[in-house]
Image (tube, rainbow, N blue to C red):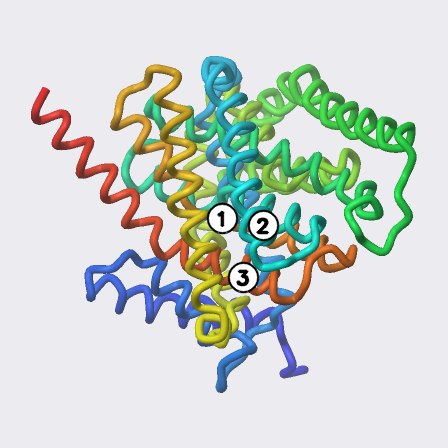
């Protein structure tokens, strides 16, 4: 039997180190995710000793994103999504624009070219799905009105990033990449095709999936097999997410979210959420470990001031923009603070965008390192932002 098993080694090493350091963090009265991130740094390629597979870890983490978004979709009906679109759509678009401009300003100060500034700014503008949803669940806000606004905001951000990932190669030449600049007709065709694919997927899920998935679940329940039911739930979540990516070029997270939202139409949706919970939690932990593996500690020492500026854009700039936007919609102070805290970090889409920018010749290795380091530092700060928002909310309720 072969002993060179990178998949088993990565899963076992990641979970064992995450458990040990997560327990230590809890003992020190820190959020467990701090321990998970530190576990990733320890098993990553930039520290001596045990090393997990850096190619497998992100793929395992993607399973966590799929299952987590699937679970959220089960608690988030189409009616809920439509109810918050008035604030989520303009809010997300304005916040993305503000964060992108702040990132471009920093890049201009550093003397970077325009294309690198655009990619850098966009990477700082989109929040992590896993971090946001875990925090909302921890504080019991997921099913609240504030939580629904945050999730709707997140869905809009993800849709914008899907468009960005498709359009960036087309604009790479114009932004200074190695590709030839396309014509306006080519750009228009690319945009129209992307929008059409997203619309086709949503229509397929709302028209066909809305009938087929609940009907399938009901048939499985009538068999009386709990094992088959659990397998059906996982197959639906992973199958729809994979199909959305392969056929419609939509992110795994969005595909899984819509699958969960359609499954919510079934009377067995709560049972489905419970059955997928253990795997969801385990792979979510692997997500934080995989993020920690990306950090080269030398960045913290070589580019300290620039990293500090990057973190301030993510934690302060994005939060301030989100707070101001929500207040413009005449929401309360504590609602605005909750939304601001939810968005004060970056994650998986930022890594994907940075990788694409590198491959297109738009982003330098320094820019990518700052994005990765900024993500980890902002994730570490995020529990503190939520704690401050929660403390203010309790004081406001007590004073009312």
Q: x%, y% of residue 210?
A: 62, 18
Residue at the image position 59 percent from the left and 40 percent from the top: 253
The residue under label 1 is: 346
Which of the image's four quarters has the N terminus?
bottom right
Verify CB contact (< 8 Å) between mark 2 and mark 3: no
The front one of 228 and 123 is 123
For the view shown, which residue lies furthest in the left direction? 399
Residue at the image position 49 percent from the left and 76 percent from the top: 298
Q: x%, y% of residue 114?
A: 70, 49
SS assignment at label 2: helix
Disc sitting over residue 71 in the figure: none
The front one of 12 and 190 is 190
The residue under label 3 is: 370
Q: x%, y% of residue 272?
A: 47, 33
The residue under label 2 is: 350
Verify CB contact (< 8 Å) between mark 2 and mark 1: yes
Residue at the image position 81 percent from the left and 24 percent from the top: 192
The front one of 249 and 215 is 249
Mark 3 and mark 1: span between their CA atoms?
A: 12 Å
Which is nearer the N-term, disc 2 or disc 3?
Answer: 2
The front one of 193 and 23 is 193
Residue at the image position 20 percent from the left and 65 percent from the top: 27
How packed is label 1: few (under 14 Cα within 10 Å), some, or many (20 or more)? many
């Amino acid at each position: 039997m072969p002993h060179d098993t990178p998949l088993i080694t990565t899963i076992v090493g990641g979970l064992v180190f995450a458990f040990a350091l997560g327990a230590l963090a809890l003992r020190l009265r820190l959020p467990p995710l701090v321990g998970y991130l530190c576990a990733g740094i320890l098993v990553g390629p930039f520290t001596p000793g045990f090393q997990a597979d850096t190619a497998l870890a992100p793929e395992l983490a993607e399973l966590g994103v799929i299952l987590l978004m699937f679970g959220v979709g089960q608690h988030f009906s189409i009616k809920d999504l439509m109810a918050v679109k008035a604030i989520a759509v303009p809010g997300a678009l304005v916040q993305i624009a503000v964060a992108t401009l702040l990132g471009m300003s920093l890049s201009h100060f550093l003397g970077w070219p325009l294309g690198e500034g655009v990619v850098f700014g966009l990477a700082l503008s989109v929040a992590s799905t896993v971090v946001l949803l875990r925090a909302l669940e921890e504080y019991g806000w997921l099913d609240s009105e504030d939580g629904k606004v945050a999730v709707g905001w997140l869905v809009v951000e993800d849709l914008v990033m899907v468009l960005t990932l498709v359009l960036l190669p087309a604009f790479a030449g114009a932004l200074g990449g190695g590709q030839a600049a396309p014509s306006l007709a080519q750009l228009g065709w690319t945009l129209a095709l992307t929008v059409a694919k997203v619309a086709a997927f949503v229509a397929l899920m709302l028209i066909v999936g809305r009938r087929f998935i609940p009907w399938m679940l009901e048939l499985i329940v009538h068999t009386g097999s709990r094992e088959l039911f659990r397998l059906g739930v996982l197959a639906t979540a992973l199958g729809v997410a994979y199909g959305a990516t392969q056929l419609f070029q939509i992110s795994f997270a969005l595909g899984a979210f819509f699958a969960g939202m359609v499954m919510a139409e079934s009377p067995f949706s709560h049972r489905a959420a419970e059955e997928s919970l253990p795997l969801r939690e385990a792979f979510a932990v692997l997500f934080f470990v995989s993020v920690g593996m990306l950090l080269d500690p030398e960045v913290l020492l070589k580019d300290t001031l620039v990293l500090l500026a990057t973190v301030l854009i993510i934690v302060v700039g994005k939060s301030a923009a989100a707070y101001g936007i929500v207040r413009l919609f005449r929401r309360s102070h504590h609602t605005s603070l909750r939304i601001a805290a939810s968005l004060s970090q970056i994650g998986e889409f930022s890594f994907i965008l940075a990788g694409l920018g590198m491959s297109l010749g738009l982003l330098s290795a320094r820019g990518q390192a700052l994005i990765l380091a900024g993500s980890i530092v902002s994730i570490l700060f995020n529990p503190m932002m939520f704690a401050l928002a929660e403390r203010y909310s309790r004081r406001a309720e007590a004073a009312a």
